[in-house]
Image: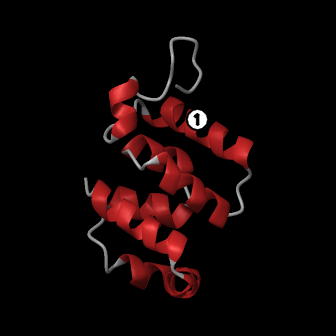
């Protein structure tokens, strides 16, 4: 996977109005400038917060992307939880080191 490229795109999207405009009008072409897998591209295109979380995207970067998409805080948290249910434990990044995102009680860690 190209987790770095996903996070680089999201970081730039979160900070650069030009990137935000390009993504809104020419998303596919903009994503072509990053080395992404088909899964990563689909998750970004569809705004799949749960899958992006499971892929390993940093929560600080991901929460800004969720806000950009108009997703409220509690819905963002629920999408992350559901991502673990739908796609399995977190695969990479810091959250993979903390048990995959779910505690033994089934809540986010």
The image quarter in which residue 37 lies: bottom left
Q: Which residue is disc 1 drawn over?
A: 82
Give left or right: position of 69 versus 15.
right
Q: Secondary structure at mark 1?
A: helix
- Extreme residue in the top direction: 104
The residue lying at 55 percent from left, 50 percent from top is 49
- Expressed as whole percent of the image width and height from the top left, the position of residue 50 reads 53, 44
Total labels: the figure holds 1
Q: Nearer the viewer, residue 30 or 65?
A: 65
Name the residue: 52% across, 88% down.
18
Q: Badge 1: how crowded within 10 Å, few (<14), some, or many (20+)? A: some
Along the horizontal axis of the image, is 96 left or right of 25? left
User: Residue 69's quadrant in the figure?
Assistant: bottom right
Q: Position of residue 94 (x, y in %)?
A: 36, 38
Q: Looking at the image, is 1 positioned above or below residue 89?
A: below
Q: What residue is at 38 percent from the left and 46 percent from the top?
A: 55
Q: Position of residue 58 (x, y in %)?
A: 43, 48
* Left or right of 60, for residue 1: left
Vertical arrangement, residue 107 with respect to residue 68, above or below: above
Residue 93: image location, x then y, percent:
33, 42
**Vertical comparison of 31 with 102: above or below:** below
Question: In this rendering, is residue 29 above or below 99?
Answer: below
Q: Is residue 101 left or right of residue 76?
A: left
Q: How is the image coloured?
A: secondary structure
Q: Quadrant of residue 40?
A: bottom left
């Amino acid at each position: 996977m190209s987790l770095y490229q996903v996070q680089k795109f999201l970081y730039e999207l979160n900070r650069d109005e030009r990137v935000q405009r390009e993504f809104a009008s020419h998303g596919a072409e903009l994503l072509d400038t990053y080395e992404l897998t088909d899964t990563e591209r689909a998750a970004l295109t569809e705004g799949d917060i749960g899958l992006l979380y499971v892929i390993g995207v940093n929560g600080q970067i991901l929460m800004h992307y969720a806000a950009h998409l108009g997703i409220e805080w509690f819905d963002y948290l629920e999408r992350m939880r559901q991502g673990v249910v739908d796609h399995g434990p977190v695969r990479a990044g810091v959250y993979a080191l903390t048990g995959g995102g779910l505690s033994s009680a089934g809540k986010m860690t």
